[in-house]
Image: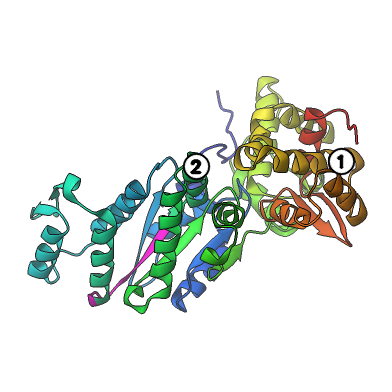
Amino acid sequence: MNWINPKIIIGNTATGDYYYDRPEIIGEIWQQILIGNHVLLAAPRRVGKSSIMKHMIDNTVDNYRCKYQNVQGLDSAEHFFKSIYELIKSCMNFNQKASEWLRLLKETGIEEVSITGTLKIRERSINFLEAVNQLLLKLKQNDYKIVFLIDELPEVLHNLNKNNNKEDAVIILKTLRRWRQEDQFSNFRLVLAGSIGIYHVIKTIEGRNVDCNDFHKVKFAALTNEEAIDYILWATGNKATIRYTEVLMQYLLSKIQYCLPYFINLMLDEINSKARKNHNPAITVNDIDRAFDEVVKNSDHFKDWKSRLFDYMPLADAEFVNEVLIFIAHKNTISMQKLYDIAIRHGKKDTYMDFIDGLEEDGYITEENNTYFFVSPFLQAFWKRNNPVYHG
């Protein structure tokens, strides 16, 4: 009855007391915004992109207003621009230039604004793209700027393209580029994030990456050893029932190696659950080993890393990438020559490094001395367990 769990969350976005601050990443994002850049959060899934974006909403800087929107599930350009329209409305200051705002809002389809700012809208008659363009132009008259924090845009673009609505995906890409490039739209900044590589998605849609090459890329690195120890101490605090000695923490991190908070959380949760079931908070390195094996067996934690390859890529491309990952899972590393040999067999002689770069960007593999290996023992163990035999 007195057992206290560690302060971790798995699956949902970590906010409030469950949010672990990454001030170096937040600082770089704001540095780029303040000098006028738009930002792309370049990171694999589960590293905390959404948590950081939500944290920025309530921890902004002077003269900026941050508005967050997860656009996952939007199925048209109209719905996308409507979501931006709603974000702009939510941060309007109706006390400033009230009559001018009212005139503009009525022009874009808003019939009535109450004292509290409640809006009555003729939404069916609104051209949301045109309405957003007009509202963005009016932002230059305000003494504040808006930062639009847009989550999961690559998935929206991918789904539009996959569902034979490439035209809408292109409209969104071209409009976002226009907003970023034209001075008349200089009073807002975009911060984009997504769990799949936006460069791969754009190249699939348009055959090139030009529509996002002007973003400043902010990378999410895994925690250093010192940061990871601090994270464990933060998660267990002074109250958690299970306590970790320096030796146990170092052993735990040696098993994880690629220290994303999500991977640490999986281990802390598994260790805590088993210890609580056994009514024994005194853990050993054997408990850590068993927890690692159990986490790998729970494919729900990692199956999306594989399934999305086949969802977001044509079958022939996904089969090539998957064979590379299976080879690494069984052989630990892959050389440039072996990569080339597999690429030739799959007919990828001229494009195979684009796929390898994509795997690096999305947090599957990394490179050292011209050889590639999994960034995480978790992913390697999952891929090997999911593909127990290699027939290369």
Q: Amino acid at mark 1?
A: Phe
Q: Is residue 237 visible?
A: no
Q: Residues within 10 Å of mark 1 (few under 14, many from 20)?
A: many
Res 21 → quadrant:
bottom right
The structure residue drawn at horizontal position 52% and vertical position 50%, both measured from the top left corner, is 154
Q: Nearer the viewer, residue 250 or 366?
A: 366
Q: In this rendered view, identify the residue nearer to me: 217 or 313.
A: 313
Q: What span is colored magenta in the figure?
A: 141-149
Query: What residue is at 59 percent from the left and 52 percent from the top?
Result: 204
Q: CA distance from mark 1 to mark 2?
A: 30 Å
Front-most of residues 188 and 161 = 161
**Residue 239: image x %, image y %?**
58, 40
Residue pointed to by mark 1: 327
The residue where tag 2 is placed is 159
Is 45 situated left or right of 326 in this image? left
Residue 282: x and y in percent read 75, 31
* Residue at 51% from the left image edge and 73% from the top image edge: 32
Q: Are marks 1 and 2 in contact (CB under 8 Å)?
A: no
Q: Is residue 261 left or right of residue 99?
A: right
Please give left or right for residue 92 compared with residue 358 in the image.
Answer: left
Residue type at the position of mark 2: Asn
**In the rendered view, would you say 167 is above or below 287?**
below
